Image (cartoon, helix red, strand yellow):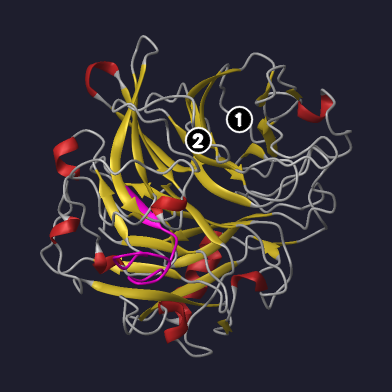
Amino acid sequence: MSLTRRDFARSSAITGAGVALAGSVGALATAPNALASTDVEGEAEGTDAAYGRVGYGPLIPDPDGILALPAGFTYRVITYSGRTKLESGETTPSNHDGTAAFDGPRGTTLLVNNHEIGGPYADADAPVPLAEGLVYDPAAAGGCTVVEVRPGGEVAEWVGIAGTSTNCAGGSTPWNTWLTCEETEDKAGSKGMTKDHGYVFEVDPCDRRANKNPKPIKALGRYAHEAVVIDPKRGHAYLTEDASNPNGLLYRWTPPEGFRHGRGKLRTLADDAGTFEAFKCFDSGGKFVDDLSRATKIGTVYGVDWIDVPDRDAKTTSVRKQFTTGQVTRCRKLEGMWWGDGGAYIVSSYARAESPGQPHDGQVWFYDPKRRTLTLKVLLGVNADPSKDGAFDGPDNITVSPYGGLILAEDGEGIQHLFGATDSGRTYPIARNDLNIGTEEEPEYSEFAGVTFSPCGRTLYANIQDPGIMVAITGPWKRQKRG
């Protein structure tokens, strides 16, 4: 059913008006109840005054050269590709990406960790081992591991799924499993693959037997998946696509009538089960919005319709290429998602020449399924100097903080951070990647990924993708003031 213009106008009035973009990072105005990238106005970056109202203070360089944190915070390396080992004896795979944390037995924390490794297994330096019974395609190098952190600090790691490709983000489910997403469209016979890829798979961190004989959830489509969330009330799945030529889409899957979610239920679905749709946005005047890069104001609200996907398995044509101009809304870098506050927070990392609107270095949108509206909550202006510490760009993985607001992982240019954004429009640094994988003359820092709090909220887990490091951050967490 389409959302009428009258319905949308009513929803827009409730959600709030926008405020104009006032410049690049550090100079963005904010709307009430919106998030924006901005520092404390009038204070020099890095001074105590600049951090006095939100956050935890300036970051202190790490003598071990891995992670800079505010005073009072510490980190611990949980897994390190090539150094730590799996239960089976192989070393931890590389390219850590999306992660979620779950309560395990006897006080343990279980983390399912994606490994974004593409291409043939034989070409990978540190692939996910092809554990017996857990392999989808023996030619593929990616997959997930499950990391168990015990109350005494001991760590164990084992394979959750193997033989998948380019496992980027994903999402946790209300029934405490992990949906891992393949960010690829490689088909059997391409790049050495023996099976089609570009699917979502379910991994159960608590039941190893449930992960045997992996089966793709084809009802959720085949494309360059990024992330997925499940609406716990309505049962819908929302999925992002990170692709270009043309830009990617946001999708919604509606379960078939009578379907009830639960552990292992998704893999029982028929390949064409339910309804699979792409989003189409329009503004308060009813005008079609072709690309999310058109939004230039914090608080911008769009109405959302959903359009049927002709061939979700993309047998001959990529899903995003099955639509003509004017049928759907696009976005260049649809990345991480997280369910919270009754809806889905959705990240767009940046927009450049391949997008028709205004260039930016990051957006976070909030989709309200009840009102069927999409509201711009975070807008990062173009970062003029990514090599300088202080500004943020290229948000990717995201989580909702138990202390208020959002935590975002940077995958941008230059220096990489974990940073927070309060619900009143302030951003603040939480960590900086100090591990230089380039040279002294030309430093290079890998992206952050897999940001997620432990179920108890006392530990923030995050990944440095290259070479593949999972860290646990603890310290004097506090609820952030509105500023």
Which-is-in-front pick, marks 2 and 1? Answer: 2
Question: As shown in the figure, which amino acid type bears the numbered disc 1?
Answer: Gln
Residue 2 lies in the magenta-colored region = no
Residue 185, horizontal then vertical, whole percent: 42, 69
In this image, 261 relative to 47: left or right? left
In the current view of this chain or complex, which residue is farthest to the front? 122
Measured as percent of width and height from the top left, residue 139 is found at: 34, 57
Residue 401 numbered mark, or none: 2
Q: Element type at marker 1?
A: loop
- State the predominant SS element of the stretch in magenta: loop
Q: Can the viewer see residue 251 in this picture?
A: yes
Asked whether residue 369 appears in the rendered view, the answer is no
Label 1 CA crowd tier, 10 Å (few <14, some 14–19, many 20+): many
Residue at 66%, 73% (x, y): give it: 294
Label 2 environment density (alpha carbons within 10 Å; few <14, some 14–19, many ≥20): many
Instruction: Compute the Cα span from label 2 to label 1.
Output: 10 Å
* Magenta segment: 179-198
* Residue ID for mark 1: 480
Q: Do the residues bearing badges 2 and 1 touch, measured as CB atoms within 8 Å? A: yes
